Image (cartoon, rainbow, N blue to C red):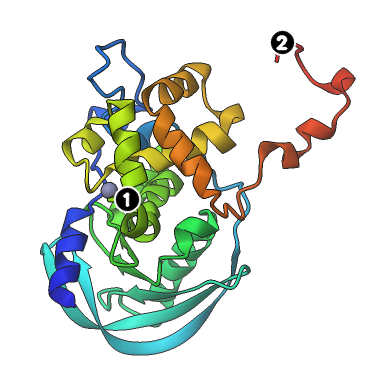
Amino acid sequence: MLAAGLGIMVACAGPAASAEQAQGPAQPTPTPAASPPFWGTIFIDPDIITPADPSSFEGLRDAGRGERTMYDRRVDGWITVEAFLFDARYDDGLAIEIQVNPEFASVDAARAEAERFAPVIGQLPRALRVGVETVWIHQGTAPFGGGNHNLLIHVGQAERYVAEGILEETLVHEAAHSSLDETHAAAPGWLAAQAADGGFISTYARDNPDREDIAESYLPYLALRHRADRISGALAATIQATIPNRMRYFDALDLDLYPIRPEVARGVAYLPALFRSGGSR
Ligand SMILES: [Zn+2]
């Protein structure tokens, strides 16, 4: 139902960076336990997934034009257009229809946008892609969106995220809406974890506990459990101290993270201790 979908999409905007937040990764601040350590978690570290990481993206096929109804944040509403369509394939069997606004002047221009984002989406864990059936791509600078089994992208906003190194991290947040919210946001186990933790990882999650807590918590979880070598000790300690029960909830799901591989797969664990740099680890 479109009406139901509208509510979901409007509700699932990613946090927009203010000038202040855009200056760099948020830093944990010593505050009372009740105050979340971050404003929004997409800003915590730009290296959780980087352009150098593997992608499951396999290829793109032109699928012509077709009438599609897409959400456009510039008008804060639904538009129905003859979209440029592309089928993106991933090497773990998943597929996504990418719908590009016809405001991009030609099929070549539209394809260039699809080719730009499809590989980045392929860097997301499979468990976050499995609920993504479509992607909407528009011009303009407006927040991304998740939910509705979709990822909403405005290319002007994407430029900002690329400049900050957080395009991948933002898509983790939005894809968590699309793939995890439906099953987990109101699950008794999740609500119990929220209660046991007693606080929130960000003010964005605290202010929208039903809508944003899964998406705001999953990226820090991914960083701590699977990218610990890339984040600071202070960041790791803050995540662990703030949401330990939510961490255990995600652990228990045992989600399929392909193509994200444990850091040991990068070779570090297989080197004899003699050849490891440092020695303090
Ligand atoms: Zn969100």
Q: 114 above or below 248?
A: below
Q: Which residue is mark 2?
A: 280
Q: Residue placed at 32% from the left, 50% from the top?
A: 187
Q: Residue placed at 78% from the left, 37% from the top?
A: 267
Q: How many marks?
A: 2
Q: Is residue 120 visible?
A: no
Q: Name which residue type carries label 2.
A: Ser
Q: Which residue is mark 1?
A: 187
Front-lying residue, 167 or 41:
41
Q: Name which residue type carries label 1.
A: Ala
Q: 102 above or below 203?
A: below
Front-lying residue, 140 or 173:
173
Q: Residue placed at 45% from the left, 48% from the top?
A: 168
Spot occupied by residue 263 in the image (x, y as percentages of width and height): 67, 37
Q: Residues within 10 Å of mark 2 (few under 14, many from 20)?
A: few
Q: Is residue 250 visible?
A: yes
